[in-house]
Image (cartoon, rainbow, N blue to C red):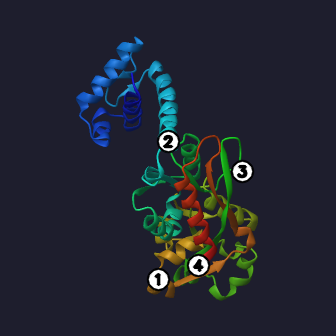
Amino acid sequence: MNFQTMEYFCAIAEQGSFTRAAAALHVTQQTLSAHIAGVERELGCKLIVRSNPLRLTHEGQTFLVHAKRLTRELDDMRREVAGPDNLQAGTLRVGISFTRGRTVLPPVIERFCEQYPNVCVDLREDTNEGILRGLLARQVDVAFGVLPASSARIESHPLFRERMVLLATTELLECHGVDPQALAEPLGRGDVSPLSGCPFVLSPPEDITGRLGLELIARAGFRPKVRAYSRNMATLLSLALRGVGVCVCPKDLLDDTRTPEQARGLTVFDLGQDATYAIDYALPADSWRWPVAERFVELALEHVESM
């Protein structure tokens, strides 16, 4: 048994297939099979049931927990003992939501790549819950999102406040008897009651954007007619631009996405201070941190300060 065997086992468990794991690792399936057979002989138990899809035995699940921990520690050790040149090479794993990955990080990654040409940025785009799980499991080096306060395992700090806006096509509003000119004042104080007769396209309630939108609607005292739910804000924005429904979305995404032609037929409203929330960045607090990850955070902070 060696560290390579553990790395192979983690890849097989993650990919759910010897074939996919071999492709990801750039080795043959025979090599993987030989390593797994060897560790099963050494431990005297079966770790993997070779079915389709494959599954781990109880012993395999236990082995996976220890294999993940040991490979993380091996990765930390390699980085800590590396010389200055090697510290600036490798893969930086960044956890972020799909929307923010598009609106916040491109200029940050551009500057980062200029400074660290030998480091590849691996964006792990996921929900806030998935990002946090990845950080706790040491599957990402730095995370950006709606994250919990600092704890024994993570160190989190404010990055910026994300502002939500409400948008709809002028045609949709007028079709449902709403005068766009009369909406600015009530919507500016978070009162969406004038839109009670309009259809909506929203994020689901477990998403911060969806929860915020539904809270505004509940405060207005009506039950919305929701034509579509989606966790993908780009999809919701596309639906809103097509006049399918009223949408609540991050202002940064709207500014980044809409074309001048779309803007002419679109009505956008600020929803006041109640429609903002904190976006944080977080790093592992319980182990050695790669200096490159901290530099990535510095660049992100410089970027949001200039926004």
Q: Amino acid at mark 3?
A: Ala
Residue behind mark 2: 81
> Is residue 243 positioned above or below 260 on the image?
above
Q: Describe residue 14's horizontal placement relative to residue 283 as left or right.
A: left
- At label 1, counting other C-alpha atoms closer than 10 Å, the crowd grade (few under 14, some 14-19, many 20 or more) is few
Residue behind mark 3: 149
Residue 179: percent from the left, percent from the top?
64, 86
Mark 1 touches mark 2? (CB < 8 Å): no
Residue behind mark 4: 176
Q: Amino acid at mark 4?
A: His
Q: Quadrant of residue 167 in the image?
A: bottom right
- Rendered residue at 72%/50% (across/down): 149
Q: Earlier in the sequence, mark 1 or mark 2?
A: 2
Q: Earlier in the sequence, mark 4 or mark 3?
A: 3
For discs 4 and 1, the disc positioned in front in the rendered view = 1
For discs 4 and 2, the disc positioned in front in the rendered view = 2
Q: Earlier in the sequence, mark 3 or mark 2?
A: 2
Judging depth in this view, the residue of 86 and 142 nearest the camera is 86
Which disc, if any, is residue 262? 1
- At label 3, counting other C-alpha atoms closer than 10 Å, the crowd grade (few under 14, some 14-19, many 20 or more) is few
Q: Describe residue 69's horizontal placement relative to residue 154 as left or right.
A: left
> Is residue 77 positioned above or below 280 on the image?
above
In the structure shown, which secondary structural element does the residue marked by tag 4 occupy? loop
- Rendered residue at 71%/48% (across/down): 150
In the structure shown, which secondary structural element does the residue marked by tag 3 occupy? loop
Q: Does residue 212 appear in the picture of this structure?
A: yes
Q: Amino acid at mark 1?
A: Gln
Distance between the Cα atoms at labels 1 and 3?
A: 39 Å
